[in-house]
Every structure is written in structure tokens, then in C-alpha cells.
Amino acid sequence: MNLDDERQAIRQELESMRESGARRQELSHHACKRLFFDLGIRPSMAAVRDLTQTGSASDIPKDIDSFWERIRGASRVRVGTGSIPKALEDRAGELLGAMFEEAVAYARSSLDVERVELHAQASAAEREVREAEIRRQASEDAVSRSEARADAAWERVRVLEAELALANSNGAVHQDSLQASVRRLDSENETLRKRLDTEQSTNAALRDRIDALHIEMRHSTEHYAQQIKDAVAEAERRVKPMLVELDSLRTMAATYQSGLRDTSRKEFEFIQQVAAAKARGDRLDAQVREQSDELDALAVELATLRAQQGIDPAIASLLGDLAKTGRLSVDEMAAIGTLADGHVILPQRCPKCEEGEPELSQVDHRYELQCPECEHSSGPGHSRLEAVTRFLSANTVPTVA
């Protein structure tokens, strides 16, 4: 402690003595004692008056003289009456006074050492106080920043609530439009299904006609071939004994050849009809396949629309952004459930190895996204949104049972 701190401590002691009812002389004596023994300052009227804040210009010097008289009386040892000579008594008093002075000097040296230690402790305490003040200021700054962030967050919440109300109103409009689109797609799907049934029945009739033409052509070919074979056999059997009938046989042969040509022409016409029927059947098959592809695409689109009809795309996008930035808690994710799964897009690459293509699996109504290369997994979740958010997040989201 420095000199000013010591003086302030003396003033506090004097104030305590004044409150307890001490008189002016006691206050002056205490101030003189602290000045002389603790601070090493010879008491003066100004110093004592500055500490006690009481007493007149004539009273304070009397109090100081009284203090010095008490000091001299304490340093002089009175040996009582007896056979000790006066000189020996004075000498003994001087010896005791010298011992007192030595004790006072030793006490002052000890006091100086303790004062240095106290100064060091006070300096350390002042440093700690300054550091505490700095930490307090930093804490106040952090609290101010936190309050500012909280105000900004509340403002953001109010903006999001307004956006959510607007999105809800827009969602009703989109819901009506979606229902109208679903009804239109259902009617178009029913029309296409009827057209497909008609085309399939027509295709079946054409196939039956093609099969009948094939059977008729085969029977005709076999019949004419058998007739030619019989005619050739009959001609060979009669050629030697019936030379006379050679011309008639040649005529018959010409007739048979003409019939064979007719048969070949009819067979060629049947083949052309079969080819035309087959080409028409191929066209119908191609048309059926195109319509089947259109039906499959419409079915996929219908399934997507049915999956997305529970929530507006803007709300789903907002929920996805909140989930990716980690601003949705586990309970909020569980409350959302699979409501926004129709709008969730699976990542094309794993965020850890950047090579694997993540695969989504569903077991017991729990979704899990896993990389087949590095086996990075999101863990089982209640929805696709939760699985994708866990998979893309660097921190592990706890699994909800």
C-alpha cells in the first residue's frame, strides 16, 4: 500500500473511533501514534488536523505534547523507592529507554519488510482487479453482442412468421391448383387407359387374322404341292404305256403349271398381306410402347405430385435450408416427419470422400443415407429430410428412438 492508502486507512479508523464515541484527544493521540510508528512521520498540527478533521489551533499542539509526554513516560522506567541510588535508577531508565528505542527500530524494520510485502500483494491485487475489470468489460461486450444477436434473431423470427403466414395463404391456392391438376391427370389417364384397351383389342384381332392367314396359306401350299406330286406320279406311271396321251398330259402339265403360277401369285399376295399386317402390328406395338412410356412417366409425375401435395415447395425449400444450416432441433425434425420428403433432393456425391454416390434405404419406416465407398452414414431417421441433413452435416445428429 502507498502513503495515500495508509492515510485513507487511518481516516477510516478515526471515523470508526468517532462513531464509537471517542473524544478529540483520543483521536489526536491515535493519529500521532499511526503517523510516528507506522508511517515514520513526526506528528505535526497540520498532519494531525488533516487526519482527524477536528480540534482548534491551540488544542492540537496540546494533544501532540501530551502524546510525546506519554512516549517519554513509557520509555522511562521508574523503579520505586528503595536502596537503589538515584544515578543507578537514571542509568537503568536510560538502558530501558535504549532497549525500547532498539525494539522500536526493529519493529520499524519489520514493518518496512511487511510494508514491501503488502505493497507487492497490493500490486498483484491491483493487477487482478484490472484483469477482472477487463474480463468484466469483455463479458459486458459479449452480453451486448448476444443481446444484439437475440434481437436480430427475434426480428428474423417475426419475418419468418410473416413469410410463413403468406406461404400458408399461397399454399391453399397451390393446393386447389394441385387438386385440379390431379383431377385433370386422372381423367387423361382414364382416357389413355381406354385408348390402350381399344388398341390392345385391335392388335389382338390383327394377330388372330395373321395367324388365320398363315394357317390358310400353309394348307393351300400343302394341297397344291400334293396335287402336283400326284400328277407327276400319275404321269410317270402312264408315260410308257400311254404315249398317245402325251399331248394331253403336256396340256395337263401346262394347266398344272398355270395353277401353280396362280398358287404362287396367291401365295405372294398372302405374304404381302401378312407383311402389311405385321408392319401394322409393329406400328401398333411401337405406339403401345410409347403410350406405356407416357403412362409410366405420368404415373411417376402423379406419384411425385401426390408426395408433394401436402406442402408448398417454398415451405419445403425453407425447411430444407433451416435443416441444412442446423437451425432445426431434433424434436422439430421429428415433428415435421415426412411432410417435406417429396421436395428433398438426394446429394450426388458423398461430402466426406467426394467419390461415392449415396444410396437411400428404408427399413421399418426409417430412412438411412449411406455412401458405399467410405461407409459414411446418416444413421436411421424418421424422414428423408432428416437423413439428408445428417448425411451432409459435419456434426453427428443424435438418433431419436
Image (tube, helix red, strand yellow):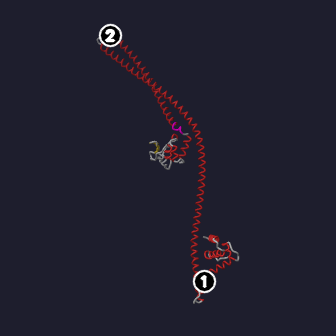
Q: Nearer the observer, disc 2 or disc 1?
A: 1
Closest to the observer: 231 or 244?
Answer: 231
Q: How many neighbours does mark 1 have within 10 angstroms: few (below 14), some (14-19), or many (20 or more)?
A: some
Which amino acid is tagged 1? Answer: Arg
Q: Dot 2 lies on which element? A: loop
Q: Is residue 307 magenta?
A: yes
**Residue density around tag 2, few if under 14, some if 14–19, many if 20 or more, within 10 Å:** some
Q: Nearer the viewer, residue 92 or 19?
A: 19
Residue 218 is drawn in which quadrant? Answer: top left
Query: What stretch of residues is rendered in magenta?
Result: 306-310
Mark identifier at residue 330: none
Q: Is residue 292 visible?
A: yes
Name the mark on residue 245: 2
Residue under numbered circle 1: 76
Q: Is residue 240 above or below residue 68?
A: above
Q: Looking at the picture, which amino acid does disc 2 mark?
A: Glu
Q: CA distance from mark 2 to mark 1?
A: 193 Å
Residue 3 visible in this rendered orientation of the protein = no
The picture places residue 311, in percent across and down from the top left corner, at 54, 39
Q: Is residue 54 left or right of residue 230?
A: right
Magenta region includes residue 253: no
Q: Residue furthest front?
A: 21
Residue at 51% in and 47% down: 331
Residue 33 pos. (x, y %)? 62, 76
Q: Residue reaching furthest right?
A: 57
